[in-house]
């Protein structure tokens, strides 16, 4: 029997409480620019690479990347650390194409099936997370959005496709005990707040009809921070909060200390967590943090402060009995437990390009918001002066301006340069690039692994 919700806990078939604690498998079946070093959004990047080297050779690279990025040794490592859960972000494009909507791509499931099976054999549960939906459910790159408009909430067609896709997924995994449950929409960004609630009502009914037993993990609106959109409590459901610390972002200040005018210390972290989980505690439902985690800089002094943020957050979660999923497992150096080796084929090929992206601040997640300030500062001043009342959803004028100029315009302008780096490579060299993300070719961030292992060992629990 699968896990299920009992009061404010998840429990196994025998009634034993299970606190799911683990990582997100970001950058795998939903690729992200800061994780593997490309610019802009995934589908635009894939198109640029296919144009540069041909569709067949591009598929050779991307399929090998999916194979190498997570294998038996990765599942074993996470189990050894003491984790019992992996949240698996997926892009809808693996399972359905825009030119043939409502038609399932069966082969798209082969890697997802493989990894769920691998994790299960190591005693690790999976949460399937639909991270990118047709039309994009939020305003940013991680929903494979090439614009700043979340069209998913504007068009019933997109919503119909997601309902059907979840019917297919739920039917496929309904008897799999190592699937902890389904996270149907990552970080919704419905600007009106009026569409997401009724959509959830409809989606829940459809999934329950296909699979009455698995847990639903539902994100709140505005990137999983606003739970006022829920008009009823659904049975066997976890309402998921995301809990990134302000001081842990790339633009974060010292810890403890001020970040963008706000004092951040352990007490502030706990107040923020408690504010973000009021709904769960008031409704007596389980606490689960679907995403959190600081960004690392390579500066030992700064990174030690980031580790302290993480220690404090984990202690807070332990005190509240909250489960969690740290973002993210593997990348090119910003957050991962393991990272591509700087001396390996991929980083040797793309390292200078990734450094250029960092210089331009072309990835929101890695941007300090100060890069190229001599160019952007006048634009920010213009917006502040001429449009003082402009407060666009979700994060206001400063962030919107950076998104439009830095993270969309500049990022998209970088696409041909990234794709050109694939040209002239043999098949063997393309495969070597992909294999750079195999665990055996990666570098482990030992202080982070030791911190997590120590917490999981000290706090106990199944």
Image (tube, helix red, strand yellow):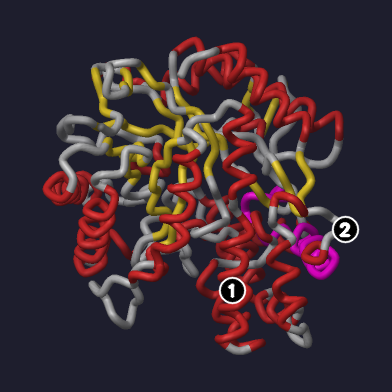
Image coordinates for residue 434, horizontal then vertical, percent = 68, 66
The quadrant of the picture occupied by the N terminus is top left
Image coordinates for residue 412, horizontal then vertical, percent = 61, 73
Residue 335: mark: none
Q: Is residue 319 visible?
A: yes
**Residue at point 59% right, 71% down?**
62
**Residue at point 77% right, 65% down?**
346
Q: Earlier in the sequence, mark 1 or mark 2?
A: 1
Specify whether residue 282 is painted magenta: no
Q: Which residue is mark 2?
A: 343
What main secondary structure does the magenta stretch of the protein show?
Answer: helix
Badge 1 marks a residue whose secondary structure is helix
Badge 2 marks a residue whose secondary structure is loop
Q: How many marks?
A: 2
Q: Is residue 251 visible?
A: no
Please state if 402 lies on the left or on the right of 96 as rendered. right
Please state if 146 lies on the left or on the right of 277 as rendered. right
Q: How far apart in space, not on screen, are marks 1 and 2 (Cα)?
A: 24 Å
Residue 254 placement: quadrant: top right
Q: Which residue is mark 1?
A: 45
Residue 337 in the image: above or below residue 32: above
Residue 404 placement: quadrant: bottom right
Image coordinates for residue 134, horizontal then vertical, percent = 34, 66
Image coordinates for residue 385, horizontal then vertical, percent = 59, 54
Residue 346 in the image: above or below residue 245: below
Q: Which residues are magenta?
A: 348-370
- Is disc 1 surrounded by few (<14), some (14 to 19) or many (20+) residues within 10 Å? many
Please state if 52 lies on the left or on the right of 283 as rendered. right
Out of 95 and 397, give the one closest to the viewer: 95
Please state if 243 lies on the left or on the right of 434 as rendered. left
Residue 161 placement: quadrant: bottom left
């Amino acid at each position: 029997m699968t896990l299920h919700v009992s009061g404010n806990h998840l429990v196994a078939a025998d009634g034993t409480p299970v606190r799911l604690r683990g990582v997100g498998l970001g950058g795998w079946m939903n690729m992200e620019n800061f994780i593997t070093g490309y610019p802009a959004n995934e589908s635009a990047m894939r198109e640029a690479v296919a144009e540069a080297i041909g569709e067949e050779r591009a598929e050779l690279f991307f399929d090998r990347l999916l194979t190498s990025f997570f294998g038996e040794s990765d599942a074993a490592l996470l189990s050894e650390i003491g984790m019992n859960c992996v949240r698996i972000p997926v892009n809808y494009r693996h399972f359905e194409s825009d030119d043939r909507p409502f038609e399932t791509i069966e082969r798209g499931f082969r890697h997802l099936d493989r990894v769920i099976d691998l994790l299960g054999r190591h005693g690790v549960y999976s949460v399937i997370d639909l991270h990118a939906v047709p039309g994009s459910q939020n305003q940013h790159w991680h929903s494979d959005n090439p614009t700043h408009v979340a069209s998913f909430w504007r068009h019933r067609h997109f919503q119909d496709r997601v309902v059907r896709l979840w019917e297919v997924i739920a039917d496929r995994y309904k008897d799999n005990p190592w699937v902890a449950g389904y996270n149907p929409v990552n970080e919704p960004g419905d600007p009106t707040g009026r569409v997401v609630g009724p959509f959830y009502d409809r989606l829940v009914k459809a999934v329950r009809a296909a699979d009455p037993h698995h847990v639903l993990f539902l994100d709140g609106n505005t990137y999983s921070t606003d739970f006022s959109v829920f008009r009823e409590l659904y049975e066997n459901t976890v309402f998921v909060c995301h809990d990134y610390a302000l001081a842990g972002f790339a633009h974060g200040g010292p810890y403890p200390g001020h970040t963008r005018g706000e004092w951040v210390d352990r007490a502030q972290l706990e107040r923020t967590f408690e504010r973000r989980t009021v709904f769960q505690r008031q409704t007596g439902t389980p606490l689960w943090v679907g995403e959190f985690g600081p960004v690392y800089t390579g500066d030992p002094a700064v990174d030690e402060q980031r580790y302290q943020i993480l220690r404090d957050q984990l202690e807070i979660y332990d005190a509240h009995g909250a489960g969690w999923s740290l973002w993210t497992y593997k990348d090119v150096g910003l957050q991962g437990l393991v990272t591509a080796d700087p001396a390996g084929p991929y980083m040797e090929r793309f390292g200078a390009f990734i450094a250029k992206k960092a210089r331009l601040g072309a990835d929101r997640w890695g941007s300090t918001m100060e890069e190229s300030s001599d160019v952007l500062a006048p634009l920010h001043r213009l917006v502040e002066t001429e449009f003082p009342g402009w407060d666009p959803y979700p994060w206001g004028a400063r962030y919107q301006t950076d998104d439009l100029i830095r993270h969309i315009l500049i990022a998209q302008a970088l696409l041909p340069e990234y794709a050109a780096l694939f040209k002239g490579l043999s098949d063997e060299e393309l495969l070597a690039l992909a294999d750079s993300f195999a665990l055996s070719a990666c570098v482990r961030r030992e202080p982070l692994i030791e911190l997590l292992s120590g917490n999981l060992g000290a706090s106990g629990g199944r």
